[in-house]
Image: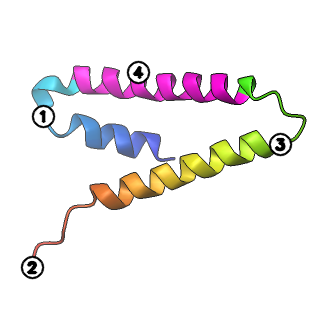
Amino acid sequence: MSVPNSLAGVVSIDSSRAGAAAGFSGFLQMAIGAITSYIIGSLLADTALPMVVAMTAGAVLSLSSHLLGQRPEKA
């Protein structure tokens, strides 16, 4: 649900570079997913704990990037 909104935000900054921004955004999504999958797969645990840790870390990173990326309201 958030991918279309984030992609619209990425490409709306500079319309002359919209293609490069969209491509880089897709690259980052795939790269982060691949790296996370590799790390979780390497942990060879018999429990769901590595996945819980990865999902929690992803949620914390998402929330922190959202809070840090907010623009202050105009007075």
The residue that appears at 37% across and 56% down in the rendered structure is 66
The residue that appears at 41% across and 27% down in the rendered structure is 28
Q: Earlier in the sequence, mark 4 or mark 1?
A: 1
Whole-angstrom CA distance, mark 4 to mark 2, is 37 Å
Q: Which residue has dot 2 on it?
A: 75
Q: Which residue has dot 3 on it?
A: 48
Q: Earlier in the sequence, mark 4 or mark 2?
A: 4
**Which element type, helix, strand or loop, lies under badge 3?**
loop
Q: Is residue 8 above or below residue 67?
A: above
Whole-angstrom CA distance, mark 4 to mark 3, is 28 Å
Give, as a single range, the part of the protein colored magenta: 19-40
Whole-angstrom CA distance, mark 2 to mark 3, is 47 Å
Q: Is residue 38 above or below residue 45?
A: above
Q: Earlier in the sequence, mark 4 or mark 3?
A: 4
Q: Is residue 33 left or right of residue 69?
A: right
Residue 31 percent location from the top left of the image: 48, 22
Q: Nearer the viewer, residue 22 or 32?
A: 32
Instruction: Tell me the tag on residue 58.
Output: none
- Mark 3: amino acid: Ala
Residue 47 percent location from the top left of the image: 88, 41
In which quadrant of the rendered view does residue 46 lie? top right
From the image, state whether disc 2 or disc 3 is nearer to you: 3
The residue that appears at 75% across and 29% down in the rendered structure is 43
Way the structure is coloured: rainbow
